Amino acid sequence: MQRNAAPLRVAAYCRVSTDREDQANSLQSQRTYFAAYIQQHQGWRLTEVFADEGISGTSTRRREAFNRMVDLAEAGELDLILTKEVSRFARNTVDALEYTRRLKRLGVGVIFINDNIDTRENDGELRLTIMASIAQEESRKTSERVKWGQLRRMEAGVVFGSNSTYGFDTRHGRLSVKPEEAEVVRLIYHKFLDQGKGTHVIARELYEAGIPPPRTAEKWSCVMVLRVLRNEKHVGDLLQKKHVTPDYLTHKKVLNRGQEEQILLRNHHEAIIDRAVWDAVQRELARRSAAQGDKSKYSNRYWCSGKIRCGCCGSRFVPRKRKRSNGFVYMAWGCHNRVRYGGWKGSGQEEPPGCGMRMVNGKSLSAVMGFVLGRLELDRAAIAASLLDDLQGLENAPDRGERVHRLRARKAALERKRENALDAFLSEKISDEELQAIRARYARELEAIGEQLQGLADAAPAQEAQWEDVTQTLEAELNRSEEVWREVTERVIVFEEYVDVKIKFVPGAFRIWYASNGKGEAYTTTIQRWERV
């Protein structure tokens, strides 16, 4: 006696949009449709109707019911899947083919009823490819129509986006001010512009004051404060298309970096911040940003931070410290790519992301800089003289000789005036009392000048000695001062056999070959040769 074959376990998949008014496409009507369709086929048994509501068909990533159906097929619980048309199953050609092939390998066929496609048949995949491509093209056209409509509405002033702008309530495409949050916005602008506080400080003060943060956050942060300061809505303007969806298949939003033209409507709605205040805040933000940008991207802890570059890959050199067992701290600089990815030696094959450039000992770097500074064509005598004048406070008299000359000229002028006063008395132009007063004043001034001249004469040998000391100190400092190196060094490029040192305002570069010897405190560096390049 022949036993009846086991019935086919059939599932149905449908995807409906919750905002569609066409009841023929409602979820309940589709359930009824598939149940009736399966009853018409002897040997079919309905397992489940899987449905996703309000989810786009261009991607399967968020379709929970669809993914659950596939999982059930992989578990061996399904034999056949029904769906009305390709556009309901997927509007992405790649997804449609990938999943139908995947299901076919599992022994599960897919029937697209309205398109009359059965993947179990020989020509099923070809016909599916054609229909899926048509569905994908229709999805693209729909996306363009939607974008066009949104663009026209944006130009008309309709606000798109979620209700998440701090200080405003967004409803039905319109913005209205929320008074309690608007006061906080004004407070943030006041703290930043009038009190000169930074975003970190403002965020902390808002948190400490117990002011509720934006709805999407647990507490205030510097990023949130910065967003408030930069949001044009607070001055009454509206900038739309800050984010765009470049791929209609993935629906992933990205920051608009020029992919599409933005729409800016000035004086679009009620402002929270006066425009003059807004403009001043934007200028201050730009100023602080520029000031921050002027600082080195890398730590300024060392004189050469950010100045050393790799001659092989162009990456910056970064410091590395190691402490030996005897307590000695070893300082070296290495290529960032080598430190991060490891070293290699060229083998003729494609190079890995690392770098094989050698490390540079910190002591060797100091020796090289000292040597280079010693070869600069500087007028050390003039520099020393200027420093000595500054030390002695003689800003108005650059050297001792000029100072003596001025004092003597003043003395001669006073003596002439004293004689002129006597002539005036003899001519009866002034009285005896006036003569005595004038002569006494001139005498005091002449005495003071005499003391200054004597002081300069006595200090001449000491000044010469001090000038010598300043010259020697200057010579040493130029060669070993890291502060000097920091100011004069433009860049250092490390190559395998030598280093190039570029000094600011000095043409060309110094190419230095050196050798090192010893370890730890006994480590020494010898300059072998050098040239200007």
Image: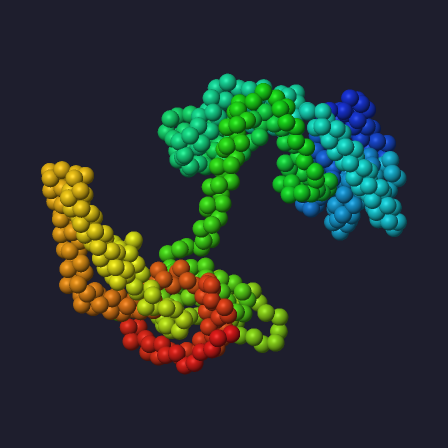
Q: Is residue 126 above or below residue 431?
A: below
Q: Position of residue 216 (x, y in %)?
A: 52, 30
Q: Position of residue 354 (x, y in %)?
A: 53, 66
Q: Quadrant of the N terminus?
A: top right
Q: Residue at position x 30%, y 64% from top?
A: 384
Q: Position of residue 417 (x, y in %)?
A: 21, 48
Q: Is residue 386 above or below residue 31?
A: below
Q: Residue at position x 51%, y 40% from top?
A: 286
Q: Is residue 174 above or below residue 295?
A: above
**In the image shown, does 87 or 102 lie closer to the viewer?**
87
**In the image shown, does 274 or 50 lie closer to the viewer?**
274
* Residue 118 shown left or right of residue 513 in the figure: right
* Residue 439 shown left or right of residue 263 in the figure: left
Q: Position of residue 324 (x, y in %)?
A: 31, 68
Q: Residue at position x 42%, y 66% from top?
A: 333
* Residue 229 shown left or right of residue 104 in the figure: left
Q: Residue at position x 88%, y 49% from top?
A: 123
* Residue 14 shown left or right of residue 313 in the figure: right
